[in-house]
Image (spheres, grey):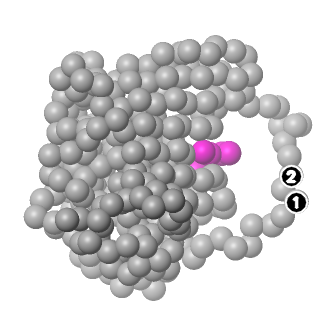
């Protein structure tokens, strides 16, 4: 069984973002690990997924891919998310999104939606998924990591490692569960949960010392062949390096019923001087 470490419950009404008219105000629970003045990529990806899901929704279309381009650090300030249906269609659609703060574009995104076929067209897998990770109740609950301030990785999400740990280098497998809504007053959708967790691959599968190197992802791509079921999303993550200064973190995504997709982050790598 997991080694339980008590964590204070969040105050009633806690969320990653508070709606303010057509804008969103980040709360401290959305902050990232590199600086208290910028957001974690997970909450930004989840907020964009929410906006894409609400863009010209049509019956029979399912969101299958979301690519987020982080143009610059997303600040702890008022955010506006604008979406555009750039490729309408009955079978395939593309939706673009722009995240703006203070008149400056801080992130772009492109999402792919594909029509859902009838049950008669369902493809039966030929390979059994017998290599699924251990469930979250067999994992180790990570202790609160203060870093001197409240943030997404230490209060906004619950993390249970079933292989590896934050303070060890190399591949790892961990389960993630949001501790609060993405937007206040709303139940997070499966895609919002997957997007929020998908940005952790780089962090849980580090191959370099956090104190000696920066390895920041300027993008995140999440692909789901089906939406995850339930509150938990698992990342089976590994980081690889190639050309000097360049790497990638790849994560297989699971829920309690099986494999659901993959997340990829490209990495800018440089020593801390």
Instruction: Say which residue label 1 marks.
Output: 126
Name which residue lies at 86% across and 46% down: 123
Most foreground residue, 5 or 212 = 212
Residue 102 rendering spot, x and y as whole percentages:
18, 23
Q: Is residue 99 above or below residue 13?
A: above
Q: Residue drawn at (62%, 37%), measured in percent from left and top?
A: 64
Is 225 contained in the magenta span? yes
- The image quadrant where one finds the N terminus is bottom left
- Discs 1, 2 touching: Cβ within 8 Å: yes
At x 41%, y 70%, the residue is 206
Judged left or right of residue 63, residue 123 is right
Residue under pointer 2? 124
Q: Which residues are magenta?
A: 223-229
User: Does the stretch in magenta take in 91?
Assistant: no
The majority secondary structure of the magenta stretch comes to loop
* Percent x, y of residue 96: 49, 23
x%, y% of residue 103? 21, 19
* Nearest to the observer: residue 200 or residue 154: 200
Position of the C terminus, as image quadrant, is bottom left
Q: Is residue 244 above or below residue 56?
A: below
């Amino acid at each position: 069984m997991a080694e339980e470490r008590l964590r204070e419950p969040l105050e009633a009404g806690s969320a990653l973002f508070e709606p303010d008219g057509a804008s969103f105000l980040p709360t401290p629970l959305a902050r990232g690990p590199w600086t208290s003045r910028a957001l974690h990529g997970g909450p930004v990806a989840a907020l964009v997924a929410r906006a894409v899901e609400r863009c010209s929704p049509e019956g029979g279309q399912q969101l299958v891919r979301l690519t987020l381009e982080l143009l610059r650090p997303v600040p702890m300030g008022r955010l506006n998310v604008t979406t555009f249906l750039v490729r309408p269609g009955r079978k395939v659609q593309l939706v673009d999104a722009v995240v703006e703060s203070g008149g400056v574009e801080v992130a772009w995104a492109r999402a792919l939606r594909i029509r859902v076929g009838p049950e008669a067209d369902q493809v039966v897998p030929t390979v059994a998924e017998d290599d699924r990770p251990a469930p979250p109740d067999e994992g180790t609950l990570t202790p609160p990591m203060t870093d001197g301030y409240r943030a997404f990785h230490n209060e906004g999400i619950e993390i249970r490692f079933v292989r590896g740990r934050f303070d060890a280098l190399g591949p790892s497998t961990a389960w993630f569960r949001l501790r609060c809504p993405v937007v206040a007053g709303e139940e997070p959708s499966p895609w919002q949960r997957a997007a929020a967790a998908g940005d952790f691959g780089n962090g849980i599968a580090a191959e370099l010392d956090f104190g000696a190197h920066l390895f920041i992802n300027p993008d995140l791509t999440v692909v789901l062949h089906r939406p995850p079921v339930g509150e938990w999303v698992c990342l089976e993550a590994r980081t690889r390096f190639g050309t000097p200064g360049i790497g990638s973190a790849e994560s297989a995504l699971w829920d309690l019923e099986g494999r659901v997709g993959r997340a990829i982050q490209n990495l800018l790598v440089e020593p801390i001087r």
